[in-house]
Image (cartoon, rainbow, N blue to C red):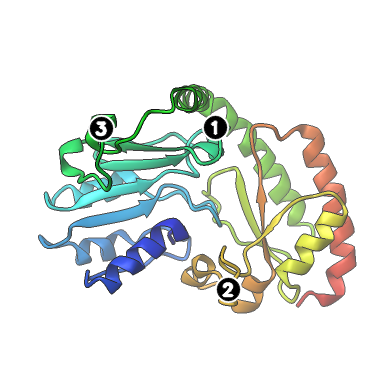
């Protein structure tokens, strides 16, 4: 269920000799807490999970995960909160490290934030002048750093209001989509409000993206992983979604700049695209 930026690092560690264990997920895409508990022992050094999934939007039970992992002092809990910040309340209690990406909350691309509960547990990957408590040496880019701090403060301060607005849009879109036969909402009911994943079984995701693009609606396909390999998306596979449904899956993303007019426009364009592809649906 992890983003490639985490998953590929884990796979690289496995090649170096580390033992990697993958936690099962429920049909809703949430971590199976009983399975996580069964995998924990005194040899576990790291547990990592997403706060909000970037493909389906499911929210992981971070508090419950903390309760399990905290019973093992050697286990470090990392949370990838890139998709959560500004959209759902962040959970810090009991988390050892939490990572964010600036461009997800109106910061600049290439910016990142790592919250560290105990910096003495982190070994620097680069040496130098000792900036940032010696964890990331190098001359500080002050204007860039100030920009991400301001963006983060704004995002956190407006989380509740944006969450309410996006939930309204989310409910409107889902209610509308349910009027169209054979179109399936893949995202779980309790997912984060800014991500809606839907499936058109029998229609390729790329075809849908191109069809919507012609109507000036920009969506993304989840029929393959982000590196455009031919394999089906691992997130949807882990949830037991059929291959034909995965191949025809697209993601609708909402944000702080989404307006009422955008939602109405999307509804009109959705109906038009549906009429174009309905004969292909299975």
On residue 229, which mark appears? Answer: 2
How busy is the neighbourhood of tag 3: few (under 14 within 10 Å), some, or many (20 plus)? few
Q: Is residue 49 left or right of residue 248?
A: left
Disc 3 or 1, which lies upstream in sequence?
1
CA gap between label 3 and label 1 equals: 26 Å
Numbered tag placed on residue 129 in the rendering = 3
Q: Using the numbered discs, state the Cα–Cα distance from disc 3 to disc 2 in whole angstroms.
A: 41 Å
Would you place residue 191 above or below residue 101 in this image?
Answer: below
Say which quadrant the C terminus sits in: bottom right
The label number, if any, that marks residue 275 in the structure image: none
Question: Is 71 left or right of 185, judged from the image as shown?
Answer: left
Look at mark 1 in the image and give the residue it sits on. Answer: 107
* Residue at screen point 62% across, 64% down: 222
Quarter of the image for residue 263 reads: top right
Crowd rating for badge 1 (residues with CA inside 10 Å; few <14, some 14–19, many 20+): many
Mark 1 vs 2, N-terminal side: 1
Nearer the N terminus, badge 3 or badge 2?
Answer: 3
Q: Quadrant of the N terminus?
A: bottom left
Secondary structure beneath dot 2 equals loop
In percent of width and height, residue 100 lies at: 43, 40
Q: Secondary structure at mark 3?
A: loop
Which one is in front, 14 or 195? Answer: 14
> Residues at badges 3 and 2 in contact (C-beta under 8 Å)?
no
């Amino acid at each position: 269920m992890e983003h490639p930026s985490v998953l590929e690092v884990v796979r690289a560690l496995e090649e170096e000799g580390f033992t990697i264990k993958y936690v099962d997920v429920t049909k809703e895409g949430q971590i199976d807490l009983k399975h996580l508990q069964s995998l924990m022992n005194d040899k576990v050094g790291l547990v990592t999970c997403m706060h909000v999934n970037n493909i389906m939007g499911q929210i992981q039970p971070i508090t419950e995960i903390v309760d399990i992992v905290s019973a093992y002092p050697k286990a470090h809990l990392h949370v990838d909160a890139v998709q959560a910040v500004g959209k759902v309340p962040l959970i810090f209690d009991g988390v050892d490290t939490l990572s964010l990406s600036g461009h997800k909350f109106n910061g600049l691309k290439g910016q990142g934030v790592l919250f560290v509960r105990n910096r003495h547990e982190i070994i620097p990957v680069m040496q130098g002048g000792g900036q940032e408590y010696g964890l990331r040496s190098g001359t500080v880019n002050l204007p860039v750093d100030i920009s991400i701090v301001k963006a983060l403060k704004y995002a956190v301060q407006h989380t509740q209001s944006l969450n309410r607005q996006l939930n309204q849009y989310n409910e409107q879109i889902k209610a509308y989509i349910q009027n169209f036969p054979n179109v399936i909402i893949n995202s779980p009911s309790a997912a984060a409000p800014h991500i809606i994943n839907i499936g058109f079984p029998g229609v390729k995701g790329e075809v849908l993206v191109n069809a919507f693009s012609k109507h000036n609606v920009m969506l993304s396909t989840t029929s393959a992983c982000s590196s455009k390999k031919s394999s089906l998306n691992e997130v949807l596979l882990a949830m037991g979604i059929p291959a034909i449904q995965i191949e025809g899956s697209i993601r609708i993303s909402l944000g702080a700049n989404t307006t009422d007019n955008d939602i109405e426009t999307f509804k009109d364009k959705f109906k038009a695209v549906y009429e174009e592809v309905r004969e292909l649906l299975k």
